[in-house]
Image (cartoon, helix red, strand yellow):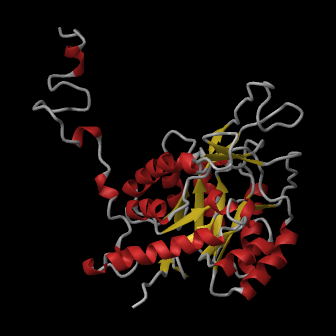
Amino acid sequence: MASDLSTTFTGVRFRNPFLLSSAPPTESESNILRAFEAGWGGVVTKTIGLHPVVNVLGPKTKFLRADADSANTALHSSWNWELISDKTLDWWVPRLGRIKQAFPDRVLVASVMAGSGNDTELRHWQELAAACQAQGCDALELNLSCPHMDRPDMGSNVGKDKELVSIVTKVVKEVASIPVWAKLTPSTTDIVLEARGAFLGGADAIVSSNTFTSLPLIDIETLDFEVNVDGLVSTGGLGGPAILPLSLAKMSQLTQAFPDKSFSGIGGISTFEHALNYFLLGCGTVQVCTAAMLDHAIGPNIIKELNAGLARFLDKHADKGWKSLDDVVGLRRDRVVAQSKIRRAGEKDYRGGYEAEGYAEELGMKK
């Protein structure tokens, strides 16, 4: 019997739990249609906004390898400083409708972004949400995480403020009849706080992680940044394999803090084995970007491997009664513990760096 790769996430049925994330691969109607033809269970559009966006001149993305002079060496990360979609809402609206008409059984998620801090900007969030859901989009993803927006009231600048996260989520939920996912920035002190704000605002799921704030390297010969315009550079986002362990750590924090909530994992996924880490930590779906960009822009070979990997995994463990992804989500969430709970080689207990009598006595501060 063929394995059941389908899953239901935030009330929406997916043919498989693998999505293309909001990024350059999902910036056009043709790419999204190609992605669905290739077999992706869902696609998150390039982020749609109401404000005009003009991207920098020249390269927007750089793929970094262990040996910079060879395309055959291992990829360790990607770097980009591309902003949200430079297409207007009016451009997106008819295309969203056509995509859903062409693939009614696939999940189309609209990524949206507006500002914050005043009623006008909050109404912009609602306008974007209403327009996208009217075209049949299955869910909304709130971009509270883009690491390189100049405006202090947009992107990760909002995502670092738990109160703004909560307010934005709440106003979108007021007009949304479809699930609302909050995509949070990993560049924060405690992502659990922002996630709590999103859930208080009514979020149906948390998405993590967006790229990490970063700079490209400086070329030692020219002393120029490897990506620049007229010698100048701004911070961008680091993604790809390098952020896999970092994103898993963020996801572990989230799923342990909110074990009954829904999460979609992003960061460094190129194989099923990578995706399985997110599932075992508690994610119901995962999203892919860098690996897909390197595979014909939308990852036709990546999605085949992901689906095949999930099928093999379920078949291999059928004797355990695992029939679908739901049977394994979160199975290793509780294995992540504090240092003091890890068994030690010696007989003496470890108390998180503190002696039983108290830290002050150890420092010679005993009275």
Q: How many marks?
A: 0
**Residue at (76% x, 67% y) in the render:** 128
Which quadrant of the figure has residue 147? Answer: top right
Q: Is residue 347 left or right of residue 14?
A: left
Note whether residue 17 is visible. no
Judge whether 3 appears above or below 227 on screen: below
Q: Nearer the viewer, residue 174 or 359?
A: 359
Q: Residue at x 71, y 51 (%)?
A: 116
**Direction from residue 215 to residue 331 in the image, left or right:** left
**Percent position (x, y) of residue 260?**
38, 66
Looking at the picture, tell me which residue is in the foreground, 34 or 363.
Answer: 34
206 above or below 190? Answer: below
52 to the left or right of 356: right
Viewer can see residue 81: yes
- Front position in the image: 278 or 203: 278
Q: Residue 49 placed where, x, y %? A: 79, 60
Percent position of residue 52, x then y: 88, 55
Residue drawn at point x = 67 percent, y = 64 percent = 295
Residue 19 lies, in percent from the top left, at: 60, 69
Quadrant location of the C terminus in the rendered image? top left
Quadrant where the N terminus sits is: bottom left
Q: Is residue 22 above or below residue 358?
A: below
In this rendering, would 30 be left or right of 322?
A: right
Looking at the image, the residue that sits furthest to the bottom is 1
* Residue in view at x 89 percent, y 33 percent: 230
